[in-house]
Amino acid sequence: TLSATQEIVIHPLPQVVSVSGGSEYCVGDAVGDVLVNVAGTPDWTITFSLDGGTPTTLTASSSPISLGNSEGVYVVSGISDANCSNTASGTQTILIHPIPPAPTAGTDTTYCIGAELVAMTVTGGSGDFVWYSDETLTNPIGTGSTYMPTENSGSTIYYVSEQLDGCSGPTDNVTISFVSCDIIIPTAFTPDGDAVNDFWIIEDLDGVYPDNEVFVYNRWGNLLYSSEKGQYTSKPWDGTFDGNPMPVGSYYFIIATGLEKESLTGVVSIVLESGE
């Protein structure tokens, strides 16, 4: 009697257990790989495509298998191991967003303490604007294209950046300063040539308001005197117009301080001793 033995081995089909690693990033971030976890007998060969291109293969001896970290849509369609081949499915997407440019935070502004404040306005792209109180951007204080400064003695720097698709761009900043604007404006002076009180002296005007301009008018609105910006102290009004002494009376003045919405107005009188 003749007999024979035939061994039949049935190998399990290789499997793609999972496909992971897709995510969104910003330009400059460390980008993770798309990983394929597999089961079966090594070596494995994965068939996949990137952004709908021609399918390609990648062979590795250990799991998980990295498909790389280039931007795009990864579609896994097949797997084979040392023994068998099988279909597979799995999709992951790596998306890399650009960094928005630095916005324009606005103009540095100086206010008198107690003055009416104007909101800072930032311009830039189509993203969201975030305001910070520190250069390291660890303390956000507001969002939106405008932000109202807080009155603090001295100067405060506000930082703002644009955020788009989860990515923060470089910052711009604006400095808001508050100064004490207490000055004494004399209501009269005596330009009689006796070297005493001959000029309309406004103490500390140029120091408190470095960009001041002073204008003096008669009662008909004619301009009699104007100063150079920030230079009033060097040439204060002497009570004349075109070298001619003005008569005793009251004259209207405007002091443009150079600050946001701040002008000082009033009346100054020329007073002379009786008989002069």
Image (cartoon, helix red, strand yellow):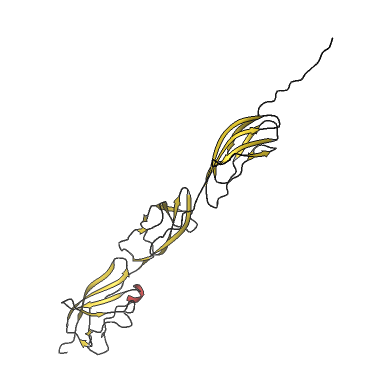
Query: On the image, which quarter does residue 62 sit in?
Result: top right
Does any portion of residue 186 appear in the rendered image? Answer: no
Q: Position of residue 13 (x, y in %)?
A: 66, 27
Residues 259 and 274: in front is 259
Q: Residue at x 26, y 71 (%)?
A: 264
Q: Position of residue 56 (x, y in %)?
A: 62, 40
Q: Check the picture and name the quadrant holding the N terminus.
A: top right
Q: Position of residue 44 (x, y in %)?
A: 67, 35
Whether residue 246 is situated above or below residue 53 in the rendered picture: below
Query: On the image, which quarter does residue 110 sit in?
Result: bottom left
Residues 9 and 161: in front is 9
Q: Residue most toward the front? A: 54
Q: Residue at x 20, y 88 (%)?
A: 244
Q: Is residue 224 left or right of residue 126?
A: left
Q: Is residue 208 left or right of residue 54?
A: left
Q: Is residue 229 left or right of residue 60?
A: left
Q: Check the picture and name the quadrant holding the C terminus.
A: bottom left
Does any portion of residue 37 appear in the rendered image? Answer: yes
Q: Is residue 183 left or right of residue 273?
A: right
